[in-house]
Amino acid sequence: MQKGKACAAIILLALACTVSGRALQSLKPLLHEENTLTSASPNVRIDVDLSQTHPVAPNLYGIFFEEIQHAGEGGIYAELIQDRTFSGLAYTQAFLDSDAQELVLGPSAFEGPTLSLHPLHEEASHPFSRNTTLYGATSLAEQLRQHAQNGGLGATSQPVSWRPLGSTTLTLTKQYSMTGNGARSLSMRLAPAQGAPGGIINTGFWGIPVQAGHQYELSAYLRDPSSDAEALLSIEVALESSQGSHTYATAVLEDVGCSWANFRATLTANTTDPNARLALRLKGGEVLVNMVSLFPAENGVEGSVSPFRSDLLDLMKGLQPRFLRFPGGCYVEGVRMRNGFFWKPSVGPVAERPGHWNGMWQYWSTDGLGLYEYMVLTEELGAEPIWVINNGLSHEESMPTAHIGPLVADALDSIEFITGATDTPWGSLRASMGHPEPWDLTYIGIGNEDCGKPYYVTNYLAFFHAIKEHYPHMQLIANCNMGSDAPTEMWDWHWYTDPQSMFNGRYTFDSMTVAKDSYVFASEYAVFDWGISTIPRGNIQGAVAEAAFMTGMERNSEVVQLAAYAPLLANINHQGALCPTNLIIYDNHRAFANPSYHVQALFAQHQGVAYAHTSVNSRSPRDNGVAASVTCQDTACASLSIKLVNYAAFPQTVSLNVSNATAGIGKRADVTVLTGSGPYATNSFDLPFEVAPKTSELLGMSPETQLELPAFSVTIIATSSDDSSAAAAA
């Protein structure tokens, strides 16, 4: 290789200025006004040796989805009606599992916002509550109760989404089952005052967003409670303003008889209003209501076309995930076994899914996002599925291994549902739902954060051997390195910490050796702890610290096989203090990405196929605040992605030296910089791109270059062996 001469005392931005005025113009605003383009001597030397490489795990960067902070309900799942089956309301009134057949709802039932914590009396009725061991001196449920009493949840408390219109009496009833399997035994009876109009309203997820000219598909199951009704009822449905003073769209559902029937209508809004409501009105008589659903027309009726909210789906696609881990986290376990996630009630016709109380994160899950929809989501994202199953453990209960046989069989059935042929029982069900082709499945997580709980080791072994016997190719993920207790193919590693610790954590995996029982899935990590509550979360300083940590994962990508930031999604109305930072923030009609999102997207875009040996050496004995990683974008290392991180509060000049480039590094590169106006710079609904990457073309790149890194910044130089642009410029 013929080396170019060092560009002594010329920083990268000055080089861009010399060659391309456009590059300087786009990068200049990234610097503080007091920072000048100087030829300061570098205090950090970065050496890259392209003769020393190792493969980067092909699925290194992905995303982790958990039903938390309304990530699904009121998030990626596009349903606009909150609590569409009234089950959440019934749960908060302690009616769902009681022996009572009817409950008349008084005014107190609709006073909000409310936060219902898990009543303990109902656990005994659930089959998974038998043969369990309760443990823990201070349970998570008790911690959450104390947290709520101290006001710690604040804005995460949820309003009741259903309310009566006028003097209508609303009664929860179990006397009119809608389905033969009992999944829809609960319904709402509407009884207006004698001779007066009445009905019910739903306010959605902190308002129903409507846009002028857009269509919305309504579905509702209705019946007259009378068995010998002479006259058929009609119900008017309307999209209207939050106080009902303005009507945006109406339709009439006619001929409601004395047996359950599904009624549908298309509503076209004539006004834009992010805070609308849905009203169902009737004149005289009584009516039973169940499964009220409203989707944007692009999603179809009850999400029959695609159940995903398009803007959030686009943001998820922007992360270019190699995998999707789902459906949780703690959501899989539940506080108790009864409110963990189990897949069989989540498949089949949407109207027949019973749903369950998301006891961990305190809201009702309709299970509209079931196993089938999660697999469709992985397909939409072009990602590898990582299916996490409950192994008989929750936060407060452990099932003895002798009793988990049904759960092991359930796990095997889930694999058949995902991968089985159409002539298998569960593969046939998948086909009937619209996907006859089987999906591929390689990874299964056995539980979540369960190491140290009673029966985890023996339960893990039962699942491990049963799955391996039937599906030997499966890669099974433990919750920790099992050591001599059990075989470990890969294990979960979780870390939430402060910015400085995250930056220092770039060396975390350096001491781990490459061995089958040490493969790591860094499935949850993020900067969470700032110590001071007034500091904006999800800021550039935290994102830069995470980027430094990610350079360490790339350096150790023979050990770290998979990695995902968490949490992914948060509805701002339910974000709360438990998870202060998230990649994507939204309300019912807007969304923005935090700085950490851009770090994740950039590293995924520039993941590459091999890591080239990269060392950072400082003239100063103190920590220099610089991290770096270089990956080859092809097997010949002809194209490079040079990732440079400056965690310092001031710009730093570094010397970049690339050696042993057999094909040369080319004279053309794209330079992308992510930084902000200060360490706490972040994004918002009003300023969604306050912190966002900016890319410019750089001509004249050489193997030895001096460059300046802005304070709290991530810089990625993408080189190319194609010198056509340089030739054209000459």
Image: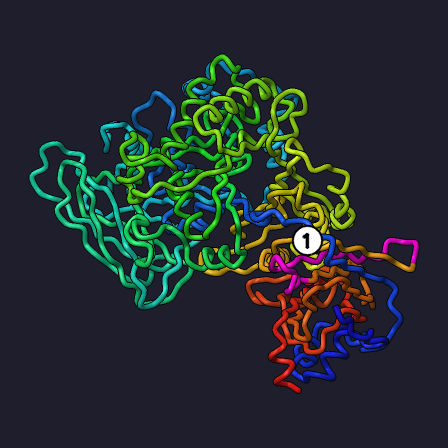
Q: Image point 50% across, 45% down: which residue?
A: 324
Q: Is residue 640 magenta?
A: yes
Q: Which residue is mark 1?
A: 611
Query: How is colour applied across the structure in the image?
Result: rainbow
What is the quadrant of residue 712 in the picture?
Answer: bottom right
Q: Residue furthest bottom?
A: 730
Helix, strand or loop at label 1? It is strand
Q: Residue furthest left?
A: 230
**Left or right of 183 in this view: 455:** right
Q: Position of residue 235 (x, y in %)?
A: 20, 49
| Residue 192 seen anywhere in this rendered image of the structure | yes
Q: Position of residue 591 (x, y in %)?
A: 51, 59
**Left or right of 402 in this view: 28:** right
Q: Image point 70% across, 68% down: which residue?
A: 664
**Left or right of 217 in this view: 454:** right
For this rendering, which residue is in front, 663 or 133? Answer: 663
Q: Quadrant of the N terminus?
A: bottom right
Which residues lie in the magenta part? 620-641
